[in-house]
Image: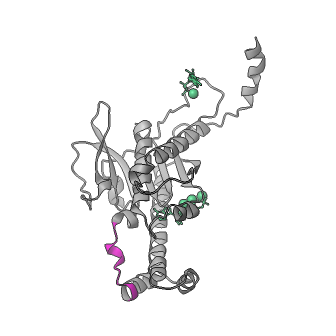
Amino acid sequence: MALSRFAYVRSYEQQDAALPNTYMLVRLDGKGFHKFSAKHLFHKPNDARALELMNHAARKVMEQLRPEVVLAFGESDEYSFLLRRSCTLYSRRQSFTDPLSKILTYVTSLFTSNYVLAWSTFFPNQHLDEAPSFDGRLVLYPTEKEVRDYFSWRQADTHVNNLYNTVFWAMVQGGKTEREAHERLKGTLSADKNEILFNEHNINYDSLPPLFRKGSTLVWRPETDACFKQSDSSSPSSLQVKTKGKSKMTLQTLHVDIIGHAFWSSPRIQPRS
Ligand code: ATP
Ligand code: ATP
Ligand code: MG
Ligand code: MG
Ligand code: MG
Ligand code: MG
């Protein structure tokens, strides 16, 4: 039969072993979003509509892959998804094909299509002029320590970039050229940037929206679990998303510190499972 005569080509699809009992972490990042954001007139330094659109696409991924994705974190044009340790997505199939690339490409395309699908809801007055794309990578982490350190690393990045961008754009909007603003910021420490913001631009960094300062963290939690209060319950991102399924779990969007111990000791996430 022609099919079986040609089927040997499948054996070239390398089986990239998905180590059992490791954490899988997928991170997506927008391709060329510096340009994409300028073309679509994103507000600088932070366009809340764009961040909420990213959060929306990420929630769709978590709903679709439920219950495999236990935690996600987003900032700027990137999103990270943590798959639970016992994740068996694709891997239990009798197949030659690499489960890791299937997971990675599935998450990446699902995120991208939902981003495009919801564009006009978040940008009702801004035509989508270009097909946005995201690249993805998948990393395996052996223990909870690396997982926590990974998310701390991303949230620290949010802080460093946001502080820099906030001062930078305050200077540019105050009349400096982009080159002058970069020059002035060269070699400055966090404390210096906070001081410039406060003294010269009347901005108290700590009073900026947590969405900008802390990024967005998505977690599933039991509907009845009221032990955790959102710091800003009026923001649209704190709306709970009801999901189907037997155990009544809601997907919550938080803008909180995830570097400290408190977040990880709460019963909301069980990456161990
Ligand atoms: P690459 O393809 O290498 O990722 P890039 O242009 O996407 O290149 P990044 O380092 O990923 O570069 O940075 C993303 C850029 O997109 C930011 O620097 C910022 O200019 C812009 N951007 C992303 N999200 C927003 C947002 N919500 N508001 C304003 N600007 C944003
Ligand atoms: P999986 O997620 O495992 O890939 P699947 O439902 O996508 O499941 P496939 O083996 O990839 O299964 O088959 C794709 C199916 O999609 C086809 O069996 C057919 O039913 C449908 N399909 C795809 N393209 C077309 C098309 N152009 N016209 C009609 N049906 C199509
Ligand atoms: Mg990149
Ligand atoms: Mg990018
Ligand atoms: Mg980026
Ligand atoms: Mg198919």
Residue 73, quarter of picture: bottom left
Position in image of residue 175 (x %, y %): 48, 85
How was the colour assigned to the protein in this rendering? one colour
The answer to which of 95 and 131 lies nearer the viewer is 131
- Which residues lie in the magenta part? 200-209
> Which quarter of the rendering shows the N terminus?
top right
How many dots with numbers? 0
The residue positioned 54% from the left and 42% from the top of the image is: 109
Residue found at the very far top of the displayed protein: 1
The answer to which of 78 and 38 lies nearer the viewer is 38
Q: Determine whether 63 is above or below 161 in the image.
A: above
Residue found at the very far bottom of the displayed protein: 199
The answer to whether residue 132 of the structure is visible from this angle is yes
Horizontally, is 122 left or right of 33 in the view?
left
**In the image, residue 107 lies in the stretch drawn in magenta:** no
Q: Determine whether 256 is above or below 177 in the image.
A: above
The residue positioned 63% from the left and 34% from the top of the image is: 98
Position in image of residue 29 (x %, y %): 55, 55
Residue 152, quarter of picture: bottom left
Horizontally, is 54 left or right of 30 in the view?
left
**In the image, residue 208 lies in the stretch drawn in magenta:** yes
Q: Quadrant of ligand 2?
A: top right
The residue positioned 53% from the left and 83% from the top of the image is: 181
Position in image of residue 126 (x %, y %): 45, 57
The answer to which of 163 and 48 lies nearer the viewer is 48
Position in image of residue 116 (x %, y %): 49, 47
The residue positioned 51% from the left and 85% from the top of the image is: 176
> Which quarter of the rendering shows the C terminus?
top left
The answer to whether residue 23 of the structure is visible from this angle is no
